[in-house]
Amino acid sequence: MASPEQKLVELGINLPKAAAPAANYIPYTIAGKILTISGQIPMGPNGIEFVAKLGADCDLATGQAAARLCAINILAQAKAALGELGNIKQVMKIQGFVNSTADFTDHPEVVNGASDLLVEVLGSAGKHARAAVGMSSLPRGVAVEVDAVIEIV
């Protein structure tokens, strides 16, 4: 089976440098065998991407792409914390926050963008419990934010 880093290459994904915090918090904590990663927004190579609200100016596919980019940034933080993604034993839970109108109800489908990427890269270690909820706004107006709790080896 391919390592997570090999899977990233196969998928054509280059992990970015882990983003620095934008406020008074740290990007991750480790307590025992648990890595908790702060909420990641869709930060791309040219800065913040996917500034939009689902149900208004953003369609489902775009929301899924935003969630996927959040998951890529989660993996970048995990690599910064652990040295290599092979040190991930299990993604235990992610929480996906979707910037959406009051009548938008496809939050789970949006967050699938993050869930699917984690499973693509990590295999069964990427399967997780999760929450997918709608928010009236998110930092910097982004479409999606995702955080993670990960068991490490």
Image: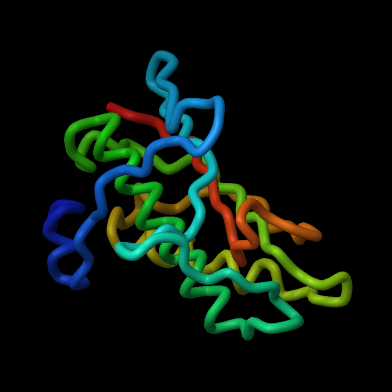
Could you tell me how many numbered marks the image carries? 0
Image position, residue 131 (x, y; %): 67, 51
Residue depicted at x 23% and y 34%: 87
Q: Quadrant of the N terminus?
A: bottom left
- Position of residue 126 relative to residue 36, above or below, is below
Report the residue at 40% width, 31% height from top: 151
Q: Nearer the viewer, residue 150 or 42?
A: 42
Percent position of residue 125, x then y: 35, 47
**How did the renderer colour the structure?**
rainbow
Which residue appears at 46% of the width and 35% of the height?
21
Q: Give x and y (percent) for residue 103.
A: 87, 76
Left/right placement of residue 97 relative to residue 36 reads right
Query: Where 98 falls versus 28 (above or below)?
Result: below
In this view, which residue lies farthest toward the right? 102
Q: As displayed, is residue 20 above or below residue 126?
A: above
- Side (left or right) of 92 relative to 8: right
127 w.r.t. 80: above or below: below
| Left or right: where 88 falls relative to 61 | left
Q: Nearer the viewer, residue 3 or 136?
A: 136
Q: Residue furthest top?
A: 32
Residue at 46% in and 57% down: 70
Horizontal and vertical percent position of residue 64: 52, 74
Hey, which quadrant is residue 79 in on the image?
top left
| Residue 150 figure quarter | top left
Quadrant position of the C terminus in the picture:
top left
